[in-house]
Amino acid sequence: MTTLKYHPATDETLQRVATALETMVENAELEWDADNERYTNRSVKAFIDSFADSDSYGVSIPMGSSTACTKLGANASIAAPTPGTIASPGTDPYASIPAFKTWNVNGYVDADGTPHVTAIEGDGNFRLDGSNGNVWVMAPVLYYAASVSGSNELLYVSKTRLQGMKPQPGALLPDGTQRPYMLYAKYAGGMYGSSYASVSGVPSVAYPETSVSHDALITLCKNATTGYAGKSYADDWYVKAMFLLKYATKHSQSVMAGCTSYHYTYACTVSESNVKRIIISATDAANLVVGSCVSLGTGTDKNVAATRSVHAKAKILKIEAYNSSNSAVYLDTTATFSTTAGTTNLFTLPWFTGATDQVEGDGSPYSNSNGKEPFKLQNIELAVGFTEVLGDVIVSSDGSSGWEICLNRDSRNEATSVTANYTRTGKYLYSDTTDSWKYPLYPDFTCDLPFGSGYGASDSSGMCDGSYTNKKATSGTREWRGLGALTLGADAGLFCVYANGGLSAADWYIGSRLSANGRKG
């Protein structure tokens, strides 16, 4: 066992981060376990604990149509952050508060579900691209309390377990011990080699290249033999709680819209051969965002291979004027291709991972409000353009009671139906006599999976996020898809849930992410 400080980084940016980390660490030391090539969990936990914080941070959430919340306790005096962009960094007064601190790390979880860290940003070994393993956001284990007071729901969190608080969802391992820290996938799920991964710079995967559904995640994440799983309700709880505490509004899209209104199919206007671009009308090109993902092909259905027949997923490198009425859209690719006017189409798709890597703090690459871009919250990249399936949640209906939320505590028990290993929460998504979008009034935090509850709001009141359910008379099971796709517009958001498909349903707008928190006590 070797005791060491962060060692110098070779890259200038990493060197800057390393210097800042050295200042923060001061006399704290991290131990390197050379036999297992990782930091010891004892020392990582001690490092996180060295940032002492026993304050309680709260928010009062109105259960009616109002979207404005009120910060409570130690949270009352903290201003809401200002999300930034690549060109214009925002401000985040929470970044220095221990309960809200995060670190980018490489690491893994073992078969028992215990997390391990192999590199921390700034130590010279950390990599975003997958060459040093999956990329996670490390955060302290939090404790929380949720209750109702009059017409408001109260949510409090703390880095210290205070009276009346319990560990956050996912904090306990299957054997009942507490995790030393939490790891959250920094990115939507993509493929690194043959593995489902959380790495920067790869296409976020969905059907038809990779089938992603509740059932498919069981195999994709190798639930039966590893500590990994598809996105967990523990991951979902964290981003929802952090957003409400930091921004004190129920309307998440009023702060960061996400890639939720970016569903375009544009026709080629000028034929070309052996090029790396497509010519489309200048009017159409003006709607596109440099850095976003597109494919070129024929037809209009994104679920068929034809929509990628000319060129598969690629990022837009630049857009330039071609003539007075057309623009050239250049793709970031090494291969050339040919396009045909009136036959070849350009299709917008969910973004590559890593779009927000250059954004400091919360925010989107260029605009937080245009509805075309992912955003980063607590260092976690979200809303890349597809809905995200929760691997440990099934929504079940008996045809009379409504759509009940059922939670699986341990990913090893994940199944393609609601078995005895699932917890029936007694909490229901609102349903009525129609298959339709409903608009909840407030977030219910009394279940480990926060969800929109109540009914009678709209896309600009209450939760402002849509909740799609089939009519109450329908029986069966549905997968839980959150956040919203690039087609959903105002129905999307952090509390959006699209529960219209069976557990094996896969589509181009359905994805997920890897989770380190599937194995829970």
Image (cartoon, rainbow, N blue to C red):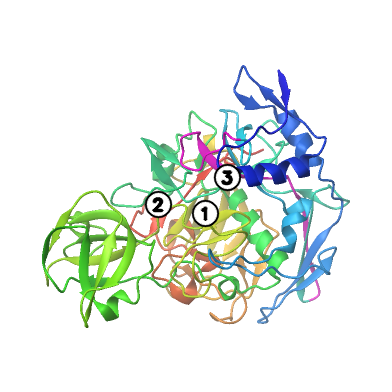
- Is disc 2 surrounded by few (<14), some (14 to 19) or many (20+) residues within 10 Å? many
Please tell me in which quadrant of the rendered image residue 253 appears.
Answer: bottom right
Please tell me in which quadrant of the rendered image residue 263 appears.
Answer: bottom left
Q: Is residue 111 magenta?
A: no
Up-down relation of residue 14 to residue 372 (above or below):
above
Please tell me in which quadrant of the rendered image residue 337 appears.
Answer: bottom left
Specify the quadrant that holds the C terminus: top right
Q: Which mark is residue 431?
A: none
Left or right: where does residue 370 sit relative to residue 249?
left
Between residue 460 and residue 332, name the one nearer to us: 332
* Count of numbered labels shown in the rendering: 3
- Is disc 1 surrounded by few (<14), some (14 to 19) or many (20+) residues within 10 Å? some
Between residue 150 and residue 361, name the one nearer to us: 361
The residue singled out by tag 3 in the image is 12
At a point 28% along the width and 77% down the height, the residue shown is 284
Q: Amino acid at mark 3?
A: Glu
Q: Amino acid at mark 2?
A: Ser
Q: From mark 3 to mark 2, how far is it between C-alphas? A: 28 Å
Image coords of residue 480 (percent x, y):
49, 57
Image coords of residue 478 (percent x, y):
45, 56
Left or right: where does residue 226 sit relative to residue 314?
right
Labelled pair 1, 2 in contact (Cβ < 8 Å)? no
Q: From mark 1 to mark 2, how far is it between C-alphas? A: 15 Å
User: Could you say whether the residue bearing mark 1 is in a helix, strand or loop?
Assistant: loop
Left or right: where does residue 368 sit relative to residue 305?
right
Look at the image and give the residue range highlighted in magenta. 124-150
Specify the quadrant that holds the N terminus: top right
User: Could you say whether the residue bearing mark 3 is in a helix, strand or loop?
Assistant: helix
The residue singled out by tag 2 in the image is 204
Image coords of residue 493 (percent x, y):
53, 68
At a point 74% along the width and 60% down the height, the residue shown is 94
The residue singled out by tag 1 in the image is 357
